[in-house]
Image: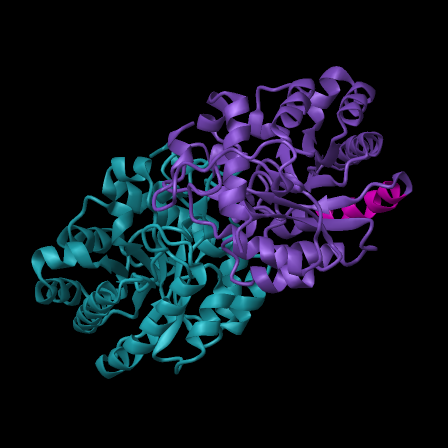
Chain colours: A cyan, B purple
Amino acid sequence: MDTLDVPSGRPAGVPTPIPGDPRLARLSLNQRTTERWSVAEAVAGCVRAGLPAVGLWREPVQEIGVPAAARLVADAGLRVSSLCRGGFLTAADPQRWRQALDDNRRAIDEAAELAAACLVMVVGGLSEGSRDLAGARDRMADGIAELAPYAARRGVRLALEPMHPIFCADRGVLSTLGQALDLAERFPAEQVGVVVDTFHVWWDPDVLGQIARARGRIAGFQVCDWITPLPPDALLSRGMMGDGHIDFPLLRRAVERAGYTGDIEVEIFNADVWAADPDEVVATLARRYVTQVLPD
Amino acid sequence: MDTLDVPSGRPAGVPTPIPGDPRLARLSLNQRTTERWSVAEAVAGCVRAGLPAVGLWREPVQEIGVPAAARLVADAGLRVSSLCRGGFLTAADPQRWRQALDDNRRAIDEAAELAAACLVMVVGGLSEGSRDLAGARDRMADGIAELAPYAARRGVRLALEPMHPIFCADRGVLSTLGQALDLAERFPAEQVGVVVDTFHVWWDPDVLGQIARARGRIAGFQVCDWITPLPPDALLSRGMMGDGHIDFPLLRRAVERAGYTGDIEVEIFNADVWAADPDEVVATLARRYVTQVLPD
């Protein structure tokens, strides 16, 4: 992990912030950043490092059951900055689309029980063999319309995640923050918000304007870097903040100007990060958060 | 190449169109699709297959000299649908930026001598170590402003190519058709137009609106497919039409509704395509053009 700690042209040797450091007050570990950790291990790791929040994933939560996971985070005094993830609402087959809705209702129930700040919605890509992008986008919007009232009754906020266009075909047909807001604005702000993930939106010529427009709708803010050359597996192409090309302070300030005061979640899918010792990953991301994300 | 010829769910056994087939009247081979071919070989390959146009690249043109290349295409009666490429106008270092302008003036001269329909502009990515995306975009725009009058004097049309956001960091900070038009519209339409490349723009929620807006500005139309899983080298991730997720007739009709009547260039960077016999590649792309691009 040492090489990750000295991005070119940046000062090295920054001490790791210790628990109680006020600079950590909004830092959240997305569980997938330390992919091998169970919920219990991730919660314990956050406590050791002084992180006040964690972003959970449904699969590891289900391994121990939702009540046990909810107890773990509550006993540790952590906030759940998000539950990942609902969505995948683009199936052309009506039965599969209905099944996806059912699964999303379960995800909403889980988010409610975990008191998650939001349920992150990765909306899904094109159906197998389909080239009907507009149709997939329509079905995704119809699905959100079905789910929003249910989420509202459970006190859960859906967080639409615009995804980098690299994932449009196979993962998320919601491609820009503007498109996400066009959809979110059909619903009350407390029902449907958006996630701003630096990896997905940094390239957008209109990103600052759309973040400003998102006032009251920003349900989550996630950070990780865009690195080049892009790793061979596009799904694992995210980098530690500072290793790539994203101007984090620019985007953080924009999100804050738009009124967002919630947690800042570090979510990194990367084979090298996953191979490293998870405690070291958390220490590194806490340092990088301080040096790369927080500066004005 | 046979596997490429039977995309799932599509009828196989389409005969290859022969020279003189009116359906080939606007089909152009971008030279990089048959990467191992010299200019002479690409020109001869187009003639054998009945393609009336070719998109040339500067490097192979320079190998034989611009006058020789111009003579080859003229003697063969081919149109030059584009010269690839100018651009790379984002350098933060003033001297390198000036050098890039000089190189672009040479590219404009070459495009004039080749009577190319346009000079494709790949604008460049972030400078080494830079995270100043807005600055890179400003320098790119300043560069176009310097070059447009020079191009006009030579009778060459600059064609701004919005590039898929996957390339924003390292290749092209011009990321959407809307952004390209915002820049192009500062200049007379005959000086600065845009290239619509299906690979780069297909995901854009606003692509149809922006294509309509581009009336009078479309200097080129390039086709190739977005395939999944994305090949390990992002630069070689383009697929033969029909092997991926793009609805070609949708985009072709939009471009034609916007008044474009020029050539349709097939530009595919793909290791498998490059490994195949170039004549077979041309035969395949001619068939695919007929079955995947031309249908209404």
Q: Is residue A120 left or right of residue B124?
A: left
Q: Kindly tell me whether residue A16 is visible in this rendering.
A: no
The N terminus of chain A appears in which quarter of the rendering? top left
Magenta segment range?
B139-152
Q: Is residue A229 above or below residue A157?
A: above
Res B289 → quadrant: top right
B175 left or right, relative to A105: right
| Vertical comparison of B187 with B97: above or below | below
Query: Can you tell which quarter of the image residue A154 is in?
Result: bottom left
Q: In this rendering, is residue B65 above or below B225?
A: above
Q: Quadrant of the C terminus of chain A?
A: bottom right
| Residue that lies at the very extreme toward the right in this rendered image | B153
Residue located at (22% from left, 57% from top): A57
Residue at the spot 44% in from the left edge and 71% down from the top edge: A260
In-image side of A58 versus B140 (left or right):
left
Give the left or right position of residue B294, taking residue A165 as reference.
Answer: right
Query: At 54% across and 70% down in the image, what residue appears?
Result: A212
Q: Position of residue B245 (x, y in %)?
A: 43, 49
Q: Is residue B258 visible?
A: yes
Is A62 or A103 nearer to us in this picture? A103
B14 and B196: which is toward the camera: B14
Q: Position of residue A182 (x, y in %)?
A: 48, 73
Q: Is residue B146 magenta?
A: yes
